[in-house]
Amino acid sequence: MTGPIQSTSPGVRPITLDGGGIPLSALLAEPADIGTPPRAVVVAVHGGGMRAGYFDGQAHPGLSLMTLAASLGYTVLAVDRPGYGQSAAHLPEGQTPAEQSVTLRAALKDFTSQYAVGEGLFLLAHSYGGKLALTAAADRDPSELIGLDISGCALRYAVEPEHLPGSRSRGQWARNWGPLCLYPPNTFRASAQLIAPMPARERDQAAHWPEHFPDVASRVRVPVRLTFAEHECWWQDDDTAVQELTSHFRAAPRVTVDRQWTAGHNISLGWAARSYHLRVLAFLEECLAERHARRDPVR
């Protein structure tokens, strides 16, 4: 008989942040050497219908971004987006991406007032969380962010509006997960604790994202990395679509587009999670190296 699946990995603990009067629940993992400041903080933002535990996958020991990053000297703060977790009672209809950006900014101000952040904040986001991350990055001074890494979010949908996330379409499950072989045994049992209803305002805003994206992307002024899973079904990710997508990041120092093979839309819960997370952290390392080079140029 299989025992109950642990809700979080060792070293991962829940905290609550003040999002401007709105309590935001979150998961926190810090480096084991408490006396040494973290190299940086990875702020992880989940997608629609999920919660922060998406980044602490429990179906296999190798899935958790939180434990992997902490072992490499980073702090990871995985937040429940506004309308999820503790904030759901305060925001039963949720918030738009722009409103979520304001709430997240307040929560991060609360976090940085209490915890060491090392070199600063690095935004990692999945799916609908990518909309929040892009909006938040566009609204922040670039000196406040190290970089931006997003999976499963683009410009144009690959489905009709009536089949967008949050609808009652039968295709939802297949588009979110893809082939079952991509995931460890117990994945769907372990993921049951991560599932949450998508708030109405968030769901209603989904169809308008292609209208908002060009302006938001044009104001992002930090390095950006975008990842598409091999079995991505929500977004157009062919060469033409990717070229149009990246063309809008006119102020970003650079934009990288990667493919994650043997992965479905929910990359961080599949067998490919460790490979993907290592690539995320490699991109963060690159961003830190670029920052150091600008700060201390060879004379």
Image (cartoon, grey):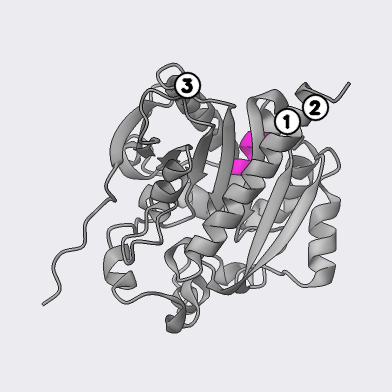
**View extreme (left): residue:** 1
Residue 79 in the figure: left or right of residue 250: left
How far is mark 3 from mark 1, CA to CA?
20 Å
Residue 17 in the figure: left or right of residue 9: right
Q: Which residue is mark 1?
A: 291
How far is mark 2 from mark 3, CA to CA?
24 Å
**View extreme (top): residue:** 113
Is residue 248 among the parts visible in the rendering?
yes
Residue placed at 74% from the left, 59% from the top? 257
Mark 1: amino acid: Arg
Q: Position of residue 238 (x, y in %)?
A: 77, 72
Q: Looking at the image, do the residues carrying marks 2 and 1 touch, with CB atoms under 8 Å apart? A: yes
Residue placed at 47% from the left, 50% from the top? 46
Stretch in magenta:
133-137
- Around disc 1, counting alpha carbons within 10 Å, would you say few (fewer than 14), some (14 to 19), or many (20 or more)? some
What secondary structure characterizes most of the magenta part? Answer: helix
Q: Which residue is mark 2?
A: 294
Mark 2: amino acid: Arg
Q: How many marks?
A: 3
Q: Nearer the viewer, mark 3 or mark 1?
A: 1
